[in-house]
Image (spheres, rainbow, N blue to C red):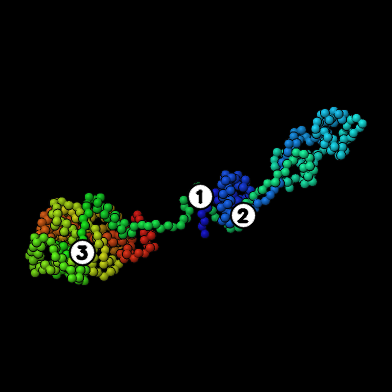
Amino acid sequence: MSQVFHDIEKKIISSLKENSKQSPESLEKSTNLSPDQIRRGIEWLKLKDLAIVNESKTSLISLGKNGLESIEKGLPERQLLNSLKNGPKKLSDLQKQLGPVFGPAMGLARKNNWVKADSDSISLNNEPAEIPAEKIIKQIGKEKIPKEKIDASELSVLLKRPDFVIEDIVKTKEITLSDSAKTLELSDSSGAIDVEAKVPQVFVARTHPLKDTIDEIREIFVTLGFSEINGNMTQSSFWNFDALFTPQDHPARELQDTFYLDGISAKKIATPEQIRKVSDSHKKNWRYQWDINEARKMVLRTHTTCVTIKHLAETKPDEARVFSLGRVFRNEKVSYKHLVEFNQIEGVVVGKNATLRDLMGIQREFYKRIGITKIKFWPTFFPYTEPSLQTMVYNERLGKWVELFGMGIFRPEVTKPLGITKPVLAWGGGIERIAMLKYGLDDVREFYNNNLNWLRSASKCQ
Ligand code: PHE
């Protein structure tokens, strides 16, 4: 199990590993932490069962006023003995010399036979080497010493004398590590914050990866100077097929490829002129009986090219850079690369000097911006463009080339009937396929599975 420790805790634990029993004061010294930090750190460790705190009472002994005085001058009895070193002295002189300590000093000296008293004078009898009380005073000095370190019977004697020694009862804490703390491995980061510490994973709300890709594509188009155009998802067959020079018997128009809105026909599909000219183009070039009822049939748009052509027929621009983006529908068998509904992006450039080279150049630029570099162009066929090309991109995951964008220059059979006079470069393709490449997926269906694990792990920035 990996635990996260505050730096304070780590310092305390390491110090206790080196020196197993410590007081808070000694921990302050060894860790360089403040008393407050030590107090808090010990509390935290105690709560986590990592530290054990033993509280006990100890008596500390230090010198009182008279004891401190004795360090310099000697104990009263020693003062008395010293003053007799050069011979006997009169009692009254000694009394004067020693002042208030004379009484006790004399009492002790006599009791221990250190002095002899004649009728009028006092003289040394046998001078003791070291008096026990002296030993104790020397031992204590200016410190506070635990009572048990001092000879108990001698101390009790000294304790009876006024102000020589002071006894303080203090509470002491002794900190040790619990068994579980002894085996802890601490990461040796020394900063105040461990930026590599494990944290619980939090899944915040996020946009869907496919939505991110759509936004990115929109952004690229806008940056390249294109403006967005929009169209309906339901369209008359006229705009989805006829206006795009797709003959009425073309296989793409069959039920198994296209979703028709059952029994719904558009009343007004286009201007009478548009209808006449488009139908003429079909009759003249494809040589068949064009049927307006076929053109009225409503479909779920099968591509965004219907949005393009409708826009161009309405605006008849000499120059334009537009794009459209949205759902399209195809009655296809769902597979790792086919969905029944998916998103398409479509770009259009209109200009009197627009050429196929420009079209390929724009493709390369777009792919580069989206992060795809391994591409090639293949010739292909669309009823509405000539020449027609297809970009193939290499899908590393699938290990094969997959078709991405269809493109070409709109045929005059498409543009002329609708009054569009300048060359039109157009290209379009599935966004899910691009997103698959970006997210390294080998199945488009993953975008619609709502698999939370994948959605959470798909990175925002590729
Ligand atoms: N509409 C074509 C498709 O859906 C793509 C395309 C768009 C081709 C514009 C040529 C020009 O695949």
Residue 47 image position (x, y, % from top left): 57, 55
Q: Nearer the viewer, residue 366 or 166?
A: 166
Residue positioned 58% across, 57% down in the render: 49
Left/right of residue 172 with respect to residue 242 in the rendered view: right
Alpha-carbon span between mark 2 and mark 3 = 75 Å
Q: Are marks 2 and 3 in contact (CB under 8 Å)?
A: no
Q: Which residue is mark 2?
A: 52
Residue 429 image position (x, y, % from top left): 23, 60
Q: Which residue is mark 1?
A: 189
Quick check: 405 above or below 14? Answer: below
| Label disc, if present, on residue 117 of the rendered structure | none
Looking at the figure, which quarter contains the C terminus? bottom left
Badge 1: residue crowd in 10 Å (few <14, some 14–19, many ≥20):
few
Amino acid type shown at disc 1: Ser
Q: Secondary structure at mark 3?
A: strand
Amino acid type shown at disc 2: Ile
Alpha-carbon span between mark 1 and mark 2 = 25 Å
Q: Secondary structure at mark 1?
A: loop
Residue positioned 56% across, 56% down in the render: 48
Q: Nearer the viewer, mark 2 or mark 3?
A: 3
Q: Nearer the viewer, residue 365 or 111?
A: 111
Work out which residue is located at the far front of the displayed protein and give it.
267
Q: Earlier in the sequence, mark 2 or mark 3?
A: 2
- Toward which corner of the image does residue 164 lie, by quadrant? top right
Q: Nearer the viewer, mark 1 or mark 2?
A: 2
